[in-house]
Amino acid sequence: MQQHTIAAEIIQTGVGLHSGVSTNVRILPAEPGSGRYFVRVDLPDSPMIPAHVTAVNQTLLSTELSKGEACIRTVEHLLAALIGMGVDNARIEIDGPEVPLLDGSAKLWIKSIAEVGLLSQPISQPVPLVLQEPIWIHENDAFACALPSSETRFSYGIDFELAAIGNQWHSWSLSTNFDQEIAPARTFGLLHQIEHLQKTGLIKGGSLDNALVCGEEGWVNPPLRFANEPVRHKILDLVGDLSLLGTFPQAHFLAYKASHNLHIQLARKILELQLIQV
Protein backbone atom coordinates (compact mmCIF):
# COMPACT_ATOMS: atom_id res chain seq x y z
CA MET A 1 0.00 0.00 0.00
CA GLN A 2 1.09 3.54 -0.73
CA GLN A 3 1.80 6.13 1.94
CA HIS A 4 -0.47 9.14 2.39
CA THR A 5 -0.29 12.71 3.62
CA ILE A 6 -3.05 15.29 4.01
CA ALA A 7 -4.13 17.05 0.83
CA ALA A 8 -4.21 20.56 2.35
CA GLU A 9 -3.33 22.35 5.57
CA ILE A 10 -5.37 22.00 8.76
CA ILE A 11 -5.58 24.74 11.41
CA GLN A 12 -6.90 24.31 14.97
CA THR A 13 -6.65 26.46 18.09
CA GLY A 14 -7.35 25.45 21.66
CA VAL A 15 -6.21 25.09 25.25
CA GLY A 16 -3.85 22.42 26.55
CA LEU A 17 -5.26 20.13 29.24
CA HIS A 18 -2.35 20.36 31.65
CA SER A 19 -0.65 23.66 30.79
CA GLY A 20 -3.81 25.68 30.32
CA VAL A 21 -1.94 27.47 27.51
CA SER A 22 -3.76 28.31 24.27
CA THR A 23 -1.87 27.16 21.18
CA ASN A 24 -2.31 27.27 17.43
CA VAL A 25 -1.72 24.09 15.43
CA ARG A 26 -1.07 24.01 11.70
CA ILE A 27 -0.83 20.56 10.11
CA LEU A 28 0.80 20.51 6.68
CA PRO A 29 1.43 17.89 4.01
CA ALA A 30 4.84 16.24 4.46
CA GLU A 31 7.31 14.50 2.20
CA PRO A 32 7.01 10.75 1.53
CA GLY A 33 8.80 8.75 4.19
CA SER A 34 9.19 11.72 6.56
CA GLY A 35 6.68 10.39 9.09
CA ARG A 36 4.61 12.42 11.52
CA TYR A 37 6.55 15.11 13.36
CA PHE A 38 6.06 18.30 15.39
CA VAL A 39 7.73 21.65 14.83
CA ARG A 40 7.83 24.17 17.72
CA VAL A 41 7.54 27.34 15.64
CA ASP A 42 7.56 29.52 18.79
CA LEU A 43 11.12 28.50 19.68
CA PRO A 44 14.42 29.68 18.13
CA ASP A 45 15.26 27.78 14.94
CA SER A 46 11.85 26.00 15.05
CA PRO A 47 13.11 22.66 16.41
CA MET A 48 11.59 19.46 15.03
CA ILE A 49 10.38 16.71 17.37
CA PRO A 50 9.69 13.31 15.77
CA ALA A 51 6.49 11.52 16.73
CA HIS A 52 8.45 8.41 17.58
CA VAL A 53 8.76 6.27 20.68
CA THR A 54 12.46 7.11 20.96
CA ALA A 55 11.45 10.75 21.58
CA VAL A 56 9.14 10.07 24.54
CA ASN A 57 10.18 12.24 27.46
CA GLN A 58 7.56 11.53 30.12
CA THR A 59 4.15 9.90 30.53
CA LEU A 60 2.47 11.52 33.53
CA LEU A 61 -1.25 11.63 32.63
CA SER A 62 -0.32 12.26 28.98
CA THR A 63 2.49 11.48 26.56
CA GLU A 64 5.23 14.06 26.07
CA LEU A 65 7.87 14.07 23.34
CA SER A 66 11.13 15.97 23.33
CA LYS A 67 14.27 16.63 21.34
CA GLY A 68 16.96 18.66 23.02
CA GLU A 69 15.28 21.41 25.03
CA ALA A 70 12.09 21.35 22.93
CA CYS A 71 9.05 19.45 24.25
CA ILE A 72 5.49 18.86 23.16
CA ARG A 73 2.89 17.37 25.49
CA THR A 74 -0.45 15.50 25.19
CA VAL A 75 0.21 14.30 21.65
CA GLU A 76 -1.82 11.10 21.85
CA HIS A 77 -5.26 12.24 20.58
CA LEU A 78 -3.94 14.07 17.52
CA LEU A 79 -1.56 11.22 16.65
CA ALA A 80 -4.37 8.69 17.04
CA ALA A 81 -6.49 10.73 14.64
CA LEU A 82 -3.70 10.89 12.06
CA ILE A 83 -2.89 7.19 12.07
CA GLY A 84 -6.56 6.25 12.43
CA MET A 85 -7.32 8.20 9.23
CA GLY A 86 -4.34 6.74 7.38
CA VAL A 87 -2.00 9.76 7.48
CA ASP A 88 1.57 8.44 7.32
CA ASN A 89 3.39 11.74 6.84
CA ALA A 90 2.48 15.08 8.44
CA ARG A 91 4.27 18.23 9.56
CA ILE A 92 2.58 19.53 12.73
CA GLU A 93 3.55 23.13 13.48
CA ILE A 94 2.60 24.36 16.96
CA ASP A 95 3.35 27.60 18.83
CA GLY A 96 3.28 26.26 22.37
CA PRO A 97 4.17 23.34 24.66
CA GLU A 98 0.98 21.29 24.47
CA VAL A 99 -1.43 20.04 21.82
CA PRO A 100 -4.92 21.52 22.36
CA LEU A 101 -7.40 19.20 24.05
CA LEU A 102 -10.32 20.55 21.97
CA ASP A 103 -13.43 18.62 23.12
CA GLY A 104 -11.39 15.94 24.91
CA SER A 105 -11.56 13.42 22.07
CA ALA A 106 -10.13 13.04 18.56
CA LYS A 107 -13.45 13.94 16.90
CA LEU A 108 -12.50 17.46 15.75
CA TRP A 109 -9.10 16.29 14.45
CA ILE A 110 -10.87 13.55 12.49
CA LYS A 111 -13.36 16.08 11.07
CA SER A 112 -10.54 18.36 9.94
CA ILE A 113 -8.66 15.51 8.25
CA ALA A 114 -11.81 14.30 6.51
CA GLU A 115 -12.53 17.80 5.20
CA VAL A 116 -9.16 18.20 3.46
CA GLY A 117 -8.77 14.55 2.42
CA LEU A 118 -5.66 12.48 1.78
CA LEU A 119 -3.01 12.57 -0.92
CA SER A 120 -1.39 9.34 -2.13
CA GLN A 121 2.39 9.38 -2.25
CA PRO A 122 4.78 7.40 -4.50
CA ILE A 123 6.29 5.29 -1.74
CA SER A 124 5.11 2.07 -0.13
CA GLN A 125 4.27 1.69 3.55
CA PRO A 126 6.77 -0.41 5.53
CA VAL A 127 5.87 -4.07 5.84
CA PRO A 128 4.38 -4.40 9.34
CA LEU A 129 6.00 -6.63 11.90
CA VAL A 130 3.95 -9.81 12.35
CA LEU A 131 4.21 -10.70 16.02
CA GLN A 132 5.18 -14.33 16.64
CA GLU A 133 5.43 -14.38 20.46
CA PRO A 134 3.55 -12.52 23.19
CA ILE A 135 5.08 -9.40 24.75
CA TRP A 136 3.95 -8.43 28.27
CA ILE A 137 4.40 -5.38 30.48
CA HIS A 138 2.77 -5.35 33.91
CA GLU A 139 2.67 -3.39 37.15
CA ASN A 140 0.73 -5.02 39.99
CA ASP A 141 -2.58 -6.05 38.40
CA ALA A 142 -2.30 -3.56 35.50
CA PHE A 143 -0.82 -4.77 32.21
CA ALA A 144 -0.34 -4.05 28.53
CA CYS A 145 0.55 -6.75 26.07
CA ALA A 146 0.79 -7.62 22.40
CA LEU A 147 -0.33 -11.06 21.27
CA PRO A 148 0.08 -12.86 17.93
CA SER A 149 -3.05 -12.33 15.86
CA SER A 150 -4.44 -12.68 12.36
CA GLU A 151 -5.50 -9.00 12.49
CA THR A 152 -4.52 -5.79 14.24
CA ARG A 153 -6.90 -5.34 17.18
CA PHE A 154 -7.04 -3.25 20.35
CA SER A 155 -8.83 -4.47 23.48
CA TYR A 156 -9.00 -2.63 26.81
CA GLY A 157 -10.39 -3.10 30.29
CA ILE A 158 -10.85 -0.60 33.12
CA ASP A 159 -12.16 -1.00 36.67
CA PHE A 160 -13.20 1.90 38.92
CA GLU A 161 -14.96 1.92 42.29
CA LEU A 162 -17.31 4.65 41.10
CA ALA A 163 -20.54 2.93 40.08
CA ALA A 164 -21.09 5.09 36.99
CA ILE A 165 -17.87 3.69 35.48
CA GLY A 166 -17.33 0.31 37.14
CA ASN A 167 -15.79 -2.48 35.08
CA GLN A 168 -15.77 -1.87 31.32
CA TRP A 169 -14.27 -3.72 28.37
CA HIS A 170 -14.16 -2.88 24.70
CA SER A 171 -12.47 -4.34 21.62
CA TRP A 172 -11.89 -2.62 18.31
CA SER A 173 -10.32 -3.82 15.05
CA LEU A 174 -8.13 -1.59 12.90
CA SER A 175 -10.24 -2.63 9.90
CA THR A 176 -13.41 -0.98 11.28
CA ASN A 177 -14.48 2.66 11.59
CA PHE A 178 -12.09 4.51 13.89
CA ASP A 179 -13.87 7.81 13.23
CA GLN A 180 -17.19 6.47 14.53
CA GLU A 181 -16.25 3.91 17.18
CA ILE A 182 -13.18 5.33 18.96
CA ALA A 183 -12.40 8.92 17.94
CA PRO A 184 -15.46 10.57 19.59
CA ALA A 185 -14.69 9.11 23.06
CA ARG A 186 -13.68 11.91 25.45
CA THR A 187 -11.12 11.98 28.22
CA PHE A 188 -12.54 11.56 31.71
CA GLY A 189 -11.60 12.43 35.26
CA LEU A 190 -12.70 11.65 38.80
CA LEU A 191 -14.27 14.47 40.78
CA HIS A 192 -12.45 13.66 44.03
CA GLN A 193 -9.04 13.84 42.31
CA ILE A 194 -9.43 17.20 40.57
CA GLU A 195 -8.32 19.46 43.43
CA HIS A 196 -5.18 17.40 44.10
CA LEU A 197 -4.21 17.35 40.41
CA GLN A 198 -4.67 21.10 40.13
CA LYS A 199 -2.52 21.68 43.21
CA THR A 200 0.28 19.64 41.61
CA GLY A 201 0.18 21.85 38.51
CA LEU A 202 -1.82 19.51 36.27
CA ILE A 203 -5.15 19.83 34.37
CA LYS A 204 -4.98 23.65 34.40
CA GLY A 205 -6.93 23.67 31.14
CA GLY A 206 -9.49 21.03 32.09
CA SER A 207 -13.17 21.95 32.13
CA LEU A 208 -16.62 20.42 31.79
CA ASP A 209 -16.44 21.36 28.10
CA ASN A 210 -13.40 19.19 27.34
CA ALA A 211 -13.56 16.30 29.81
CA LEU A 212 -16.14 14.00 31.35
CA VAL A 213 -16.16 14.21 35.15
CA CYS A 214 -17.47 11.41 37.36
CA GLY A 215 -18.34 11.56 41.07
CA GLU A 216 -20.04 9.42 43.69
CA GLU A 217 -23.46 10.54 42.43
CA GLY A 218 -22.67 9.79 38.79
CA TRP A 219 -21.56 11.86 35.81
CA VAL A 220 -21.35 15.59 36.47
CA ASN A 221 -21.75 16.53 32.79
CA PRO A 222 -23.78 13.93 30.91
CA PRO A 223 -24.83 12.68 28.43
CA LEU A 224 -22.15 10.20 27.35
CA ARG A 225 -21.54 9.55 23.67
CA PHE A 226 -21.28 5.80 24.35
CA ALA A 227 -22.42 3.74 27.33
CA ASN A 228 -18.76 2.71 27.74
CA GLU A 229 -17.16 5.97 26.60
CA PRO A 230 -14.37 5.85 29.24
CA VAL A 231 -12.91 2.55 28.06
CA ARG A 232 -13.22 3.59 24.42
CA HIS A 233 -11.17 6.66 25.29
CA LYS A 234 -8.50 4.40 26.77
CA ILE A 235 -8.32 2.65 23.37
CA LEU A 236 -7.92 6.08 21.78
CA ASP A 237 -4.96 6.77 24.07
CA LEU A 238 -3.44 3.36 23.32
CA VAL A 239 -3.77 3.89 19.56
CA GLY A 240 -2.09 7.29 19.86
CA ASP A 241 0.74 5.98 22.01
CA LEU A 242 1.43 2.95 19.80
CA SER A 243 1.36 5.17 16.70
CA LEU A 244 4.79 6.28 17.93
CA LEU A 245 6.10 3.03 16.42
CA GLY A 246 5.40 4.55 12.98
CA THR A 247 3.15 1.71 11.84
CA PHE A 248 1.23 -0.86 13.86
CA PRO A 249 2.55 -4.40 14.01
CA GLN A 250 0.04 -7.12 13.19
CA ALA A 251 -0.93 -8.07 16.73
CA HIS A 252 -3.72 -8.02 19.27
CA PHE A 253 -2.94 -5.25 21.75
CA LEU A 254 -4.60 -5.95 25.09
CA ALA A 255 -4.48 -3.69 28.15
CA TYR A 256 -6.10 -3.63 31.58
CA LYS A 257 -6.02 -0.71 34.01
CA ALA A 258 -2.99 0.48 32.10
CA SER A 259 -1.48 3.97 31.66
CA HIS A 260 0.54 5.98 29.18
CA ASN A 261 3.60 4.65 30.97
CA LEU A 262 2.67 1.00 30.34
CA HIS A 263 1.66 1.80 26.74
CA ILE A 264 5.07 3.32 26.06
CA GLN A 265 6.92 0.50 27.81
CA LEU A 266 5.11 -1.92 25.50
CA ALA A 267 5.97 0.20 22.45
CA ARG A 268 9.65 0.19 23.44
CA LYS A 269 9.66 -3.60 23.76
CA ILE A 270 8.10 -3.89 20.31
CA LEU A 271 10.68 -1.47 18.89
CA GLU A 272 13.47 -3.65 20.31
CA LEU A 273 11.95 -6.64 18.50
CA GLN A 274 11.63 -4.67 15.26
CA LEU A 275 15.28 -3.63 15.40
CA ILE A 276 16.38 -7.21 15.98
CA GLN A 277 14.45 -8.41 12.93
CA VAL A 278 15.69 -5.70 10.57
Image (tube, grey):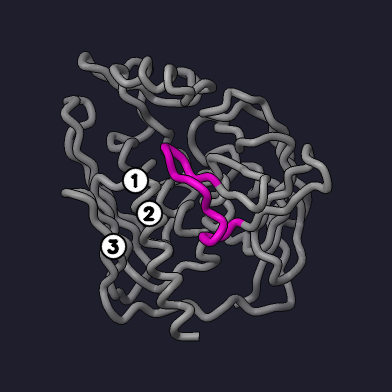
Q: Position of residue 126 (x, y in %)?
A: 57, 78
Closer to the N terminus: mark 1 or mark 3?
3
Quarter in which the N terminus is drawn: bottom right
Q: In this picture, which residue range is highlighted in magenta?
A: 51-64
Cα distance, mark 1 to mark 3? 12 Å
13 left or right, relative to 168: right
Q: Is residue 55 magenta?
A: yes
Is residue 122 positioned above or below 179 on the image?
below
* Mark 1 residue element: loop
Q: Position of residue 19 (x, y in %)?
A: 57, 27
* Mark 2 residue element: helix
Q: Which residue is mark 1?
A: 259
Q: Which residue is mark 3?
A: 145
Closer to the N terminus: mark 2 or mark 3?
3
**Residue shown at 70% from the left, 67% from the top:** 34
The type of residue carrying mark 3 is Cys
Q: Which residue is mark 2?
A: 263
156 left or right, relative to 116: left
Of all residues shown, which one is farthest toward the bottom?
278
**Residue shown at 31% from the left, 81% from the top:** 132
The type of residue carrying mark 2 is His
**Figure quadrant of residue 43:** top right
